[in-house]
């Protein structure tokens, strides 16, 4: 059996806190190995109640380590000074806008970079700061050329349709994604080659892309493609709304709908960060379309994944909900003592799927 571990690139967060009590890494991220397996199983096959029970069992095993990060991080005092609008405008004008408008497309890129930047540019346009739509359209076209869809593949397997793939090339290829993504894609394509598909059409025809992140025969339930998928899908929504070319608007809208359909069908996974990206995408498409299928799907994923994992004291008795024997909030890792923290917290900036 091959054991695949999380995670792709994740945000590094700074918390305002003094460190007392538990010292990271606290270990047992999901409780015990048995708890972890049960959480994975229930998220995929069980009821919402089964998932909550599985997570609560993991909470009980972790005990006062609830909310403890996987790694030691440097804590800093946050600066809450409100910036002047002129300061924000200066950073936008001198740093971000030139960088966005100078993006050059030669290789397929992952969503956390170009799509992230393009999404910010579309939001800037909404605030009255113009950006060249042609450059943004190029980013959108680059992203749609990576989507696992009939535009790019002759025969599409329905279970993975709509996902934005990661290119799989050798490390010496100039389009190799590098870092944790590159090595993770290499590992998955080596161990589960059916998840890697050669595209037939489009700008990247002839290139192979990883288009799946869960594979039952190998007990592989990582879910990591959701991270960039969320960024790209929401970028597609804004591109469809704001681009002024009717062909592009239709193309980007179709990409957003396909991306949201994949988000509906993708099973929730133990890493809440991944499933949260899908919830975000579904919420944005529901806000745009009003279609209840997206609202129902995002609520199901909330109830199956995020809500059971939030550290709460809903009856204000001083104890963590769902723990038995009851765990006092005051005994938890310091930054977990404010209700709302997830019960297990990934602070890693780097990780690997294998």
Image (cartoon, rainbow, N blue to C red):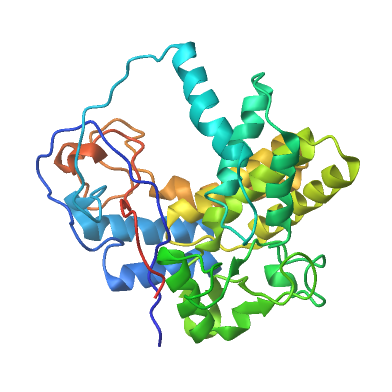
Placement of 327 over or under 186, stated as above or below: above
- Is residue 296 visible from the viewing direction of this image? no
Residue that protrudes farthest toward the right in the picture: 246
Q: Residue at x 62, y 33 (%)?
A: 121
Closer-to-camera residue (41/106): 106
Q: Position of residue 193 (x, y in %)?
A: 58, 85
- Is residue 187 visible from the viewing direction of this image? yes
Q: Position of residue 23 (x, y in %)?
A: 12, 50
Q: Residue at x 82, y 76 (%)?
A: 154
Q: Quadrant of the C terminus?
A: bottom left
Q: Position of residue 276 (x, y in %)?
A: 51, 48
> In the image, is 187 to the left or to the right of 137?
left
Residue that protrudes farthest toward the bottom in the picture: 1
Closer-to-camera residue (7/282): 7
> In the image, is 100 to the left or to the right of 148?
left
Q: Residue at x 61, y 78 (%)?
A: 196
Q: How many marks?
A: 0
Placement of 54 over or under 77, stated as above or below: below
Using the rendered view, name the quadrant where residue 236 is placed.
top right
Q: Position of residue 39 (x, y in %)?
A: 41, 65
Using the rendered view, name the quadrant where residue 311 is placed.
top left
Placement of 80 over or under 145, stated as above or below: above
Using the rendered view, name the quadrant where residue 135 is placed.
top right
Closer-to-camera residue (180/173): 173
Q: Quadrant of the N terminus?
A: bottom left
């Amino acid at each position: 059996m091959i054991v695949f571990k999380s995670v792709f690139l994740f945000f590094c967060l700074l918390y305002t806190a003094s460190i007392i009590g538990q010292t990271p890494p606290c270990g047992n991220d999901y409780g015990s190995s048995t708890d972890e397996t049960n959480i994975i199983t229930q998220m995929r096959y069980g009821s919402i109640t089964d998932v909550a029970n599985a997570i609560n069992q993991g909470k009980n095993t972790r005990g006062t380590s609830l909310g403890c990060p996987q790694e030691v991080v440097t804590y800093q005092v946050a600066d809450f000074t409100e910036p002047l609008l002129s300061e924000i405008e200066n950073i936008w004008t001198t740093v971000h806008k030139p960088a966005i408008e100078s993006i050059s497309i030669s290789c397929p890129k992952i969503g956390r970079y170009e799509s992230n930047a393009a999404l910010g540019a579309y939001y800037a346009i909404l605030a009255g700061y113009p950006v060249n739509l042609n450059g943004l359209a190029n980013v959108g076209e680059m992203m749609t050329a990576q989507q696992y869809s009939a535009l790019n593949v002759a025969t599409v397997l329905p279970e993975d349709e709509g996902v934005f793939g990661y290119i799989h090339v050798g490390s010496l290829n100039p389009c190799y994604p590098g870092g944790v993504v590159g090595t993770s894609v290499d590992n998955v394509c080596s161990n589960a080659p059916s998840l890697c598909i050669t595209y037939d059409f489009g700008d990247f025809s002839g290139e192979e892309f990883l288009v799946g992140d869960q594979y039952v025969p190998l007990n592989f339930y990582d879910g990591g493609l959701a991270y960039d998928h969320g960024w790209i899908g929401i970028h597609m929504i804004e591109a469809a709304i704001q681009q002024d070319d009717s062909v592009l608007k239709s193309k980007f809208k179709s990409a957003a709908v396909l991306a949201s359909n994949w988000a509906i069908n993708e099973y929730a996974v133990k890493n809440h960060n991944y499933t949260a990206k899908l919830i975000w995408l579904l919420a944005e498409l529901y806000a745009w379309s009003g279609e209840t299928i997206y609202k129902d799907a995002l609520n199901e994923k909330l109830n199956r994944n995020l809500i059971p994992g939030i550290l709460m004291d809903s009856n204000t008795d001083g104890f963590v909900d769902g723990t038995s024997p009851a765990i006092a909030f005051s005994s938890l890792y310091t930054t977990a003592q404010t209700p709302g923290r997830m019960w297990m917290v990934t602070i890693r900036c780097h990780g690997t799927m294998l």
